[in-house]
Image (cartoon, helix red, strand yellow):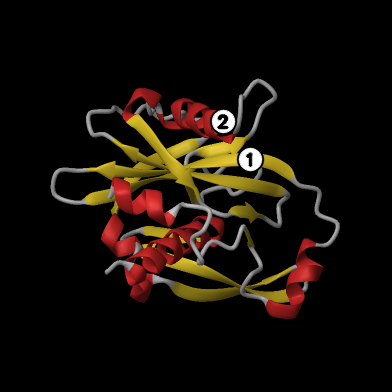
Amino acid sequence: MRDLLARALSADNPAARGRRSDYDLNGTAKAEFLKDVTLRQAAVLVPIVERANAYTILLTKRTEHLPKHAGQVSFPGGAVDPADRDAVDAALREAEEEIGLNRSYVDVCGFLDEYRTGTGFSITPVVALVRPGFTITLQPDEVDSAFEVPFDFLMDRRNHKRQSAFWKGQMREYYAMPYMDYHIWGATAAMLVNLCDVLDAVQETTP
């Protein structure tokens, strides 16, 4: 997996677009959705856990009372603070604060495409392998739960659904990956599609 991720996350991967957004599935409406949006830098950790029998991806469910993205499934992460050295430092700090994931268990492998949200964030997704043995301690003001989803499930395109909702006066399409009682959708699902894209590209070219 480590070698595969290194090749998938390299800058010359043809599936890497450089930039993605909440509105990539919405054609001509994309410019209107993103118009006049002031972007704040953020980072998330995409933690691939090296379980003995299979890889998983660690996700969180946000609490219901938050002002933005309440109750949604997300990666650990948040805004880049002035004290953070870079996006990697921000993603690792947020993971420690939100779910108690000690950075000593985390091996950063690279980055997915920058992701722009309609709520005003430019997110750097930091992909990492996580060794088992870590403990989870939730920040109850922000995180309702943390859970793991099989890597193979999330990388199976048959599980990548397209759904739609009325937003800002227009119908907006987005990716969704329902898993058990969890509804993985929006930016989180789109970043997982990005990971699938770059992995597929290098696997297709492997002799």
155 vs 79: above or below: below
Residue at 80% in and 54% down? 37
Please, which residue is most extreme toward the front here? 207
Left or right? Give the position of 107 relative to 133.
right
90 vs 71: above or below: above
The residue type indicated by label 2 comes to: Ala
- Does the CB distance between marks 2 and 1 fall below 8 Å? yes
Q: Looking at the image, which is closer to me, 25 or 59? A: 25
User: What is the secondary structure assignment of the residue under circle 1?
Assistant: strand
**Residue 8, percent across and down?**
41, 56
Residue at 58% in and 75% down? 164
Please, which residue is most extreme toward the top here? 83
Q: Looking at the image, which is closer to me, 101 or 48? A: 48
Within 10 angstroms of label 1, few (less than 14), some, or many (20 or more) residues?
many
Query: Which residue has dot 2 on it?
Result: 90
**Residue 94, percent across and down?**
52, 31
The label shown at residue 42 is 1
Does residue 148 show up? no
Residue at 76% in and 47% down? 39
The residue type indicated by label 1 comes to: Ala
